[in-house]
Amino acid sequence: MRGLLLIILLILTTAPVVADTGSLRAIVSNSNAPPYALFDESGDLAGGISKDILEALASRSTITLNFLPLPRGRVEQWLRSDEADIACFLSPAWVEQPELLAWSPSLFTTRQVIVRRSHSLSITQLTDLLGKRVGTDRGFSYPEFDAVFSQRLIIRDDAISLQSNLMRLQKQRLDAVLTVDRAYEYHQQQFNSEGLHADPLWTAPDNVYCAINPNRPELASRVQQTLQLMIDDGTIQRILLRYQPAVRNE
């Protein structure tokens, strides 16, 4: 009897950990700028667009939601290796092997912007940045700039947060900062950094998606269908409006 118990214990302790079909392991990286992810002083996820969308998704799907704090650079690997199930604020254009992941419908669009000091010249084309040092988010991909970054024609300078990049821009340690419209507008509403101006990137707005674990096709299909319903009934739009900066009178 004792031998049988030892065998059972050995099986239980050596068996691989698999996801419960009733759970959703969601990655929200702290490198996602507010309002996409909001963290408290302890580093715990406290709010933001990604959190609100994922909580609404889990509630509608009657799935238990577990948040995973993970650096942006490890997101794709964890999704592909069945260590996580979903990560939002992504695009097939921003990952190395999009064909190896499942994808949600497009949730909304975002526009990339280039922030500069107000007194500097407008940035309207790639050549305006040649030889310049540009602040970027650590772990993020910038398809329009990858070639010039790799050739050092434009200097990529990573930081952990948009706030850090904008502070460096104000101190003239950077020539410009790459970010997205909602993140910059939200930052300005909270901090109103003076002496800065955002030029829209010359490319079309980007569609934003959730990337999904491809190893659980039933869960992936369930998530895709629920997110489509949330788009159709206006849930996603209402979440975005919660974080829409108030219009300031000049």
Image (cartoon, grey):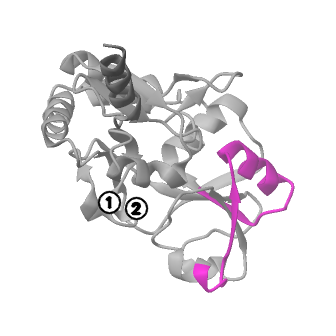
Callout 1 crowding tier (Cα within 10 Å): few <14, some 14–19, many ≥20: some
- Give residue 75's position: percent from left, percent from top: 45, 49
> In which quadrant is the N terminus drawn?
top left
Magenta span: 150-178
Amino acid on which the number 2 mark rests in the picture: Val
Question: Vertically, is 153 above or below 226?
Answer: below
Asked whether 13 falls inside the magenta stretch, the response is no
Q: Quadrant of residue 240?
A: top left
Element type where label 2 sits in the image: loop
Q: Is residue 250 visible?
A: no
Q: Secondary structure at mark 1?
A: helix
For label 2, the residue is: 95
Q: Which residue is mark 1?
A: 92
- In the image, what residue type sits under mark 1? Pro
Residue placed most toward the observer, 18 or 214: 18
Q: Is residue 240 visible?
A: yes
Q: Residues within 10 Å of mark 2 (few under 14, many from 20)?
A: some
